Image: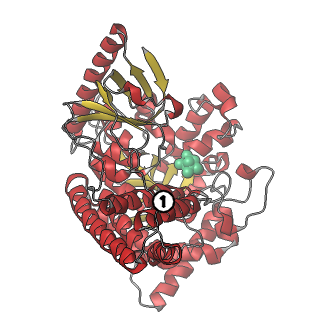
Amino acid sequence: MKTIQGIGVSAGIAVGAIRVPDTADRAVERHVVDDPNAEVERFRTARDTAVVQLKQLRDKTAAEFGEDMAELFDTHQLMLRDPAYAENIEDLIASRKVNAEYAVSDTAERFAAMFAGMDNSYMQTRAADVKDVSRRVINVLIDERGGVAADEGSSEGHIVLAEDLAPSETVQLDRAKVLGFVTAKGSANSHTAILARTMGLPAIVGIGDAFEPADDGHTAVIDGTSGLVFIDPDAATLAEYQSRKAQYEEHLRLLQELKGKPTETKSGQRVRLYANIGRPSDVAAVLANDAEGIGLFRSEFLYLESEDWPTEEFQFEAYRQVAQKMGDRLVVVRTLDIGADKQVGYFNLEHEGNPALGYRAIRICLTRPEIFKVQLRALLRASVYGNIAIMLPMITSVEEVRDAKRILEEVKEELRGEHIDFDERIQVGVMIETPASVIMADELAAEVDFFSIGTNDLTQYTLACDRQNPKLGRFADPHSPAVLRMIRMAVEAAHRHGIWCGICGELGADLNLTDTFLAIGVDELSVPPTSVLPLRNAIRNC
Ligand code: PEP
Ligand code: MG
């Protein structure tokens, strides 16, 4: 038995024979062409065919996995139509008299290297995309069909083991035959990993040098949660994982049954069960997991994923989309929480010796209101499209809340002057994530409509333990009575003033504390989308 540790990116267990698809990049040879104009025409025709293929792939993906997943293939079509991409290829053909296959392959390598070198994880994933679309064009040029030929003639129920899988190849895997996949390359946030999760296919990436094409045909067990791969498993391992697989499938079945069921305990105590998101495309997972609202939209991702200041229009579009997709359900948008571990180049923040205690979040917004106002305008404008609430992070005093509300009022007044509609009754809340905010909770509760406890930072600041430091172990225990007492104090203060109090930090999803949170009277729990149904199950069993 060979045991390999990879990165588990999509939960689930698969047991089956390994199949190594023949996906080695078709060898692209370079040769001189007599008629570069004809070669440019060849490229254009192949590109147009590839665009048609991508349209079909888009429709198939939309039908099977939803619009959000399909958007990736809109992006792929745009990449193929990008004038800079075509220009580079056509220039190469014209100036060096090379064949179209070579020009596409060379351009793909250059563009991929450029994207991979960018200091932005979103742009880095574009490197795989540009290679993926270029491979499709090359396949058309050498008269092969686009996409992976992974399943042709293969036996039923196998595990794909590959060097890498492009998103377009992943989406074309035959789910009736493919039980899961393992790749040598890849990362947890790649589109391929996201697709695997959406498809419910156990998947492991990043096994690196352990990738061995000679394993083709051998039996494997893969565990997409732990990232473990067993090749030629011994009888005990096989039996153990077969039983775990059965348990996991039973768990999934149970969870599906819970969709649409109320989140209430056996004695009838209701809790609002919301989800956390970082970007508009996460709403698909929120809806798929039947969350009752969004309790934390970390809006700073719109800033982290931009090369420059996100404009009011760009932000408005993002908030509008989320609000609209969520309909009547509440969407709590946290205002900009930049600083500490979340650095953005164009903010030009000075280096700080102790950034977690530094110039971050609301402190930036209150001292640079011109930045804050852009976000508030976008949020207010989007508020007429759904049920948006505004949440202020890192609050330590009543003055900060009053200052923020004053700026909000100025923005409202501006909008009224411009006859732009917004939700006049929009809720404003604060995050309780500093000890000061707990101590001042009564005074703060009198100022706002709700509290949401950020247990990640509250643990860090209460226990004086850097949340980024993995060495702190038991000292950074969020189950510490000090943290739990802080939570209780915040909830009680909220209730004394007739406002609601939720938890949006990671602790909200900790099933060992569900009973405690219910006993304390927490009104809302906002957790990662995949934790929604397990938490509903736990609450219904309380
Ligand atoms: C928190 O601090 O618990 C929280 C939800 O905010 P973030 O993790 O984004 O700092
Ligand atoms: Mg926080």
Q: Does the rendering let one see residue 307? A: yes
Q: In the displayed structure, does residue 429 sit left or right of residue 243?
A: right
Q: Residue at x 33, y 70 (%)?
A: 47
| Image height of 73 relative to 179, above or below | below
Give the image location of residue 509, x and y in percent: 43, 37
| Image height of 506 relative to 445, above or below | above
Give the image location of residue 222, x and y in percent: 37, 26
Q: Residue at x 43, y 56 (%)?
A: 28
The C terminus lies in which quarter of the figure? top left
Which residue is more in the foreground, 233 or 326? 233
| Image height of 63 relative to 24, above or below | below
Give the image location of residue 382, x and y in percent: 40, 74
Q: Amino acid at mark 1?
A: Arg
Q: Does the rendering let one see residue 286? A: no
Indicate the secondary structure of the residue bearing disc 1: helix
The quadrant holding residue 510 is top left
Local packing at callout 1 (Cα closer than 10 Å; few below 14, some 14-19, many 20+) is many
Q: In the displayed structure, does residue 166 sit left or right of residue 50?
A: right
Which residue is more in the foreground, 6 or 137? 137
The N terminus lies in which quarter of the figure? top left
Q: In the displayed structure, does residue 261 sit left or right of residue 5?
A: left
For mark 1, what is the residue?
126
User: Which colour style is shown?
Assistant: secondary structure
Q: Residue at x 50, y 53 (%)?
A: 451
The quadrant holding residue 204 is top left
User: How many numbered callouts?
Assistant: 1
Give the image location of residue 176, x and y in percent: 18, 38
